[in-house]
Image (cartoon, helix red, strand yellow):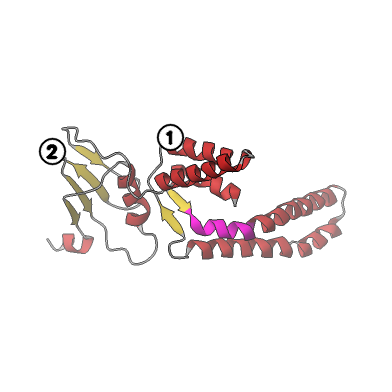
Amino acid sequence: MVVSLAMAPLTAFHFQQIQLAGLVTNFILIPVASFVVPLSFLLSAFAAGASAVGMGWFDKVVSLAEWLPGLLAAGMMAVTRLAASVPAGTLDVPKPGAFPIAMFLASLTVALGVRRAAIRQAGWMAVALSMAIIVWPLALASAKVTGRATLIFPDAGRKDVFFIRLPDGRGFAVDANRPDRGGFDTWRRVLAPLLRNQGERNWEALILWAAPAAGRL
């Protein structure tokens, strides 16, 4: 739990997400992984050694024993997929700055390393405050009006989306894709976090240009 809590700011920094369900699944995955990894290494080492000395029959024994780590690995993947499908199991957050991350790590160090109860309690309060700053849904800095037109092409895979910010500060989003029917939610997973990280809080319009409609014009 402490490790998962300590990694939360780094996860928010690199992926703009905090895995709430991951805090629970780690209690299952970490003990299983600590058994699967050494077992797989030993089986591979024994199989390689047996092949080197000409004990081909031992390879068959190892192949029979490989079902156990394979089964456990499949179970770990199933638990991971289940955790990823839990509603509200993942919290999307803006990319935190260096100050709240440093504040969180320093506070956590004080909360875990100091013996005096009063200082330790203050450390946990600082941990809670820094986490509140990290998970705040809007970026602390707003987008600045530069007086120049800005065109943003997000890295959204095979999606035709771009954003344009006019010199007067008005912003427009243009989406020329078909409506998503299940699967990966590009707006929620990629585009909305990108806008939050850049301090974008309001846009004049969202222009939808579906491919079938474009073909009839």
Q: Nearer the viewer, mark 1 or mark 2?
A: 1
Q: Secondary structure at mark 2?
A: loop
Looking at the rendering, in which quadrant would you find the C terminus? bottom left
| Tag 1 and tag 2, C-beta contact below 8 Å | no
Tell me which label, 1 or 2, sits earlier in the chain.
Answer: 1
Lateral position of residue 48 relative to residue 194, left or right: right
Instruction: Please give the residue where the numbered disc 1 appears in the rendered image.
Output: 99
Lateral position of residue 204 relative to residue 193, left or right: left
- Residue density around tag 2, few if under 14, some if 14–19, many if 20 or more, within 10 Å: few
Q: Amino acid at mark 2?
A: Asp
Please give the label number shown on residue 187. none
Lateral position of residue 51 relative to residue 149, left or right: right
Magenta segment boundaries in residue numbering: 19-29
Instruction: Please give the residue where the numbered disc 2 appears in the rendered image.
Output: 168
Total numbered circles: 2
Q: Secondary structure at mark 1?
A: helix
Q: Which of the 4 image quadrants contains residue 121?
A: top right
Q: Position of residue 197 (x, y in %)?
A: 34, 43
Q: Nearer the viewer, residue 131 or 28?
A: 131
Check residue 27 for magenta coloring. Answer: yes
